[in-house]
Amino acid sequence: MMLLRGGTLIDGTGAPPAPDAAVAIRDGRIEAVTIGAGRAPDAGGDEVVDATGLTLLPGLIDCHDHLAMHGYDLPRRWGLDEPASTRALRTAAVLRRTLAAGYTTIRDAGGLDAGFRQAVDEGLIPGPRLVLALAIVSPTGGIGDRVSPSGHDCLVPPDPALPSGVANGVAALRVTLRALVRAGADVIKCATTGGASGRPGHGPKDRAFNADELAALVEEAHALGRRVMCHALGGPGLRAAVEAGVDSIEHGCYLDEDPELIPMMAERGISWVPTLTVYAYHRESPAPHVRERARALHDHHVASLARAVAAGVRVVAGTDAGGHGHPPNAAELQHLVEAGLGPMRALQAATRLAAECLGLERELGTVEKGKRADLVAVEGDPLQDIRLLQDPARVRLVIKDGVVVRREQ
Ligand SMILES: [Zn+2]
């Protein structure tokens, strides 16, 4: 057994910080949580980890990342700029760094193949627990369609570990989803609108998929036991996604423009992953159409956040990192706080609420008896300064599945 003693616990449930906490860990799970040193279980013979002066949190979760993406430009997106082995090792380095930053679970929204999950599970490389989408399901011309500005299809031979997500029509969609699940997809990522960084002519309010296609996609995914995370920024494609009953809306920048959507999401339990971090990057993009789109949506995004919180929508943290490099995942928590979310609520967006978004709330997201022992201990109080979670020097201890994966004295 391992006993973590002396820290101030923010357990993820929303309860206020509890000083002098003790967390007992056995066989990868939390066996007991006690508050107050006098009541800590006897540690006789067990490993004791002193967390005095640190803040203990549940292992952090990013619900929208692209760990295997390393830039938006075409050579990088298509993997032409370096050998595949270098690229894979570059991705492995991102996984290691992400875990060391206290992120014990990542939902990858496309690009990371199931071989990485296997490598982490086998202990070949250190990395977070992975929930994988593999590819983005969209119709021809949607954001999952790999076409160059010249109109040429992607010249790189298809990778069987990353099946194509391009599908048109109900029958093709069902085949595509089954192929993705066969290749190891844990979640289905689809797109019903364009995005900020998409090609000119397929913008944030331009729709992809018709109602029949979307209904079939959601039905097939759920029949396969997979949740649907849907890239949708605004306009009719955003509404169609909510109406079709996807499980989470990714981006959702223009939710404020359709007053019915936010209450519908709250009522249906549809999570929202605003991914504010990526738009901060896009607002300074060298591509004029990307910059304009990102600047135009900003006020709507912030207004949508206030309304969603007020309506009780489950707002969760995701960076949409990858194309814009791999900044600290906790940058999203700073953006959420700056956009008006309270710091405790922001922490929950990366812990309990994020676990709910992933359907893993029985296993992850809070420091409670019976949960998997995923914990992070940081120097300082993140409720006073949420930015400290981005500082690697402040992350002193990371535990995943009861195993210490980082420990700084
Ligand atoms: Zn994304």
Image (cartoon, helix red, strand yellow):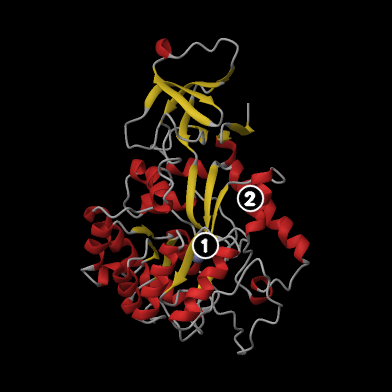
- Give x and y (percent) for residue 406: 63, 34
Q: Quadrant of the N terminus?
A: top right
- Give x and y (percent) for residue 329: 52, 51
Q: Circle 1 is placed at which residue position?
A: 109
Q: Circle 1 — which element?
A: loop
Residue 126 in sight here: no
Q: Describe residue 140's horizontal placement relative to residue 15 as left or right.
A: right
Residue 189 is labelled as: none
Q: Earlier in the sequence, mark 1 or mark 2?
A: 2
Q: Circle 2 — which element?
A: helix
Look at label 2 and name its amino acid: Leu
The residue located at (53%, 78%) in the rendering is 166
Q: Describe residue 398's horizontal placement relative to residue 353 as left or right.
A: right
Work out whether residue 331 or residue 193 is closer to the camera in this orientation and state it: 193
Q: Circle 2 is placed at which residue position?
A: 95
Look at label 1 and name its amino acid: Ala
Vertically, is 40 above or below 265? above
Based on the displayed image, in which of its 4 quarters is residue 69 positioned?
bottom right
User: What crowding class fits label 2: few (fewer than 14 Cα within 10 Å), some (14-19), or many (20 or more)?
Assistant: many
Work out whether residue 84 or residue 356 is closer to the camera in this orientation and state it: 356
- Give x and y (percent) for residue 390: 52, 45
- Give x and y (percent) for residue 247: 37, 61
